[in-house]
Image: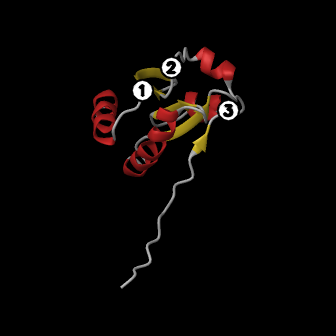
């Protein structure tokens, strides 16, 4: 018997110079931004993990992605030296940073430690 499965994909927020201030700096809830690039293998591995976690934190944490190739100035302003790099912002300030690929359980544990979840 074949079952139809509907996969609900969350539309990921993409950050650029036009929405960074509004979506990150003025956000009422913490924001975790995935700084990534298309050519980066570990970034592509992190993508599904990041999307899965975004579903678990709906309403508590905003998840967003920023392509460092398209937004070099924002990447430089946030001192991105290696990718994937996840920066957690709260009240417009960086409160945590995680660099490199992280399995889902590890990432969730680190995120909870940073945001107090």
Q: Are marks 2 and 1 in contact (CB under 8 Å)?
A: yes
Give the distance between the C-alpha atoms of the residues marked 3 and 1, in whole angstroms.
21 Å
What residue sits 33% from the left and 35% below the top? 107
The image shows residue 36, relative to residue 48, as above or below, that is above
Query: What residue sits right under mark 1 in the picture?
Result: 100
SS category of the residue bearing label 3: loop
**Is 108 on the left or on the right of 11, as rendered?**
left
Gap in Å between the C-alphas at discs 2 and 3? 19 Å
- Residue 64: x and y in percent read 54, 39
Instruction: Tell me which corner region of the image, top left, top right, bottom left or bottom right, holds residue 49.
Output: top left
Q: Is residue 62 visible?
A: no
| 15 vs 96: above or below | below
Label 2 element class: loop
Left-right relation of 95 to 81:
left
Q: Helix, strand or loop at disc 1?
A: loop
What is the number of callouts on the image? Answer: 3
């Amino acid at each position: 018997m074949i079952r139809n499965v509907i996969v609900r994909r969350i539309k990921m927020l993409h950050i650029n110079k036009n929405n960074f201030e509004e979506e990150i700096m003025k956000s009422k809830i913490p924001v975790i931004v995935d700084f990534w690039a298309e050519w980066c293998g570990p970034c592509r591995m992190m993508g599904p993990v990041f999307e899965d976690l975004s579903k678990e934190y709906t309403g508590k944490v905003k998840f967003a992605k920023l392509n460092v190739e398209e937004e070099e100035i924002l990447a430089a302003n946030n001192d991105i030296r290696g990718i994937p790099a996840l920066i957690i912002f709260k009240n417009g300030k960086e409160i945590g940073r995680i660099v490199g690929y992280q399995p889902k359980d590890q990432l969730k544990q680190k995120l909870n430690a940073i945001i107090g979840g």
